[in-house]
Image (spheres, rainbow, N blue to C red):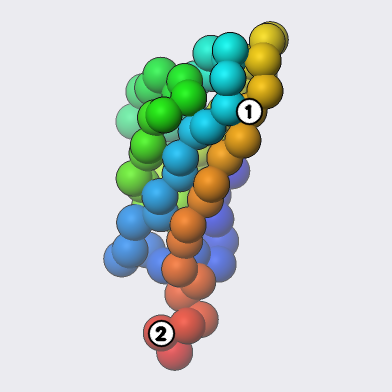
Amino acid sequence: HRDGGGSPSLFDILVSLGRNHHATFALPDVQAELDYSPGAMVYISGRVLEHSVCPWLNGERLVIAHFMKDAVHD
């Protein structure tokens, strides 16, 4: 998905937490898949880049997402 309300000029921060899981963070627009295991941090413009997390099979997963809505700047 893309974050339609996000600001295209700012980066979002996504932090993968949890235990005993292996996940992959996909960025189809740039044909990339990143390791999204616990402790991984991803900085992207969620409005500009399509992104998703592929299904994971084991463990617990928690994500902290920090972003700025574009409407805050208006």
Q: Is residue 7 left or right of residue 18?
A: left
Residue corresponding to mark 2: 73
Label 1 crowding class (10 Å Cα cut-off): few <14, some 14-19, many 20+? some
Q: Measuring from the top left, give residue 69's x and y in whole percent.
A: 50, 71
Figure quadrant of the N terminus: top right
Q: Nearer the viewer, residue 7 or 67?
A: 67
Kindly tell me whether residue 19 is visible in this rendering. Answer: yes
Kindly tell me whether residue 33 is visible in this rendering. Answer: no
Q: Which comes sooner in the sequence, label 1 or label 2?
A: 1
Query: Residue type at mark 1?
Result: Arg
Residue at the extreme front of the image, as rendered: 19
Query: Residue type at mark 2?
Result: His
Q: How many marks?
A: 2
Q: Is residue 33 above or below residue 51?
A: above
Residue corresponding to mark 1: 61
Q: Residue at x 68, y 10 (%)?
A: 58
Check if mark 1's residue and mark 2's residue have beta carbons within 8 Å.
no
Q: Is residue 60 above or below residue 65?
A: above
Q: Measuring from the top left, give residue 11's x and y in whole percent.
A: 34, 56
Label 2 crowding class (10 Å Cα cut-off): few <14, some 14-19, many 20+? few
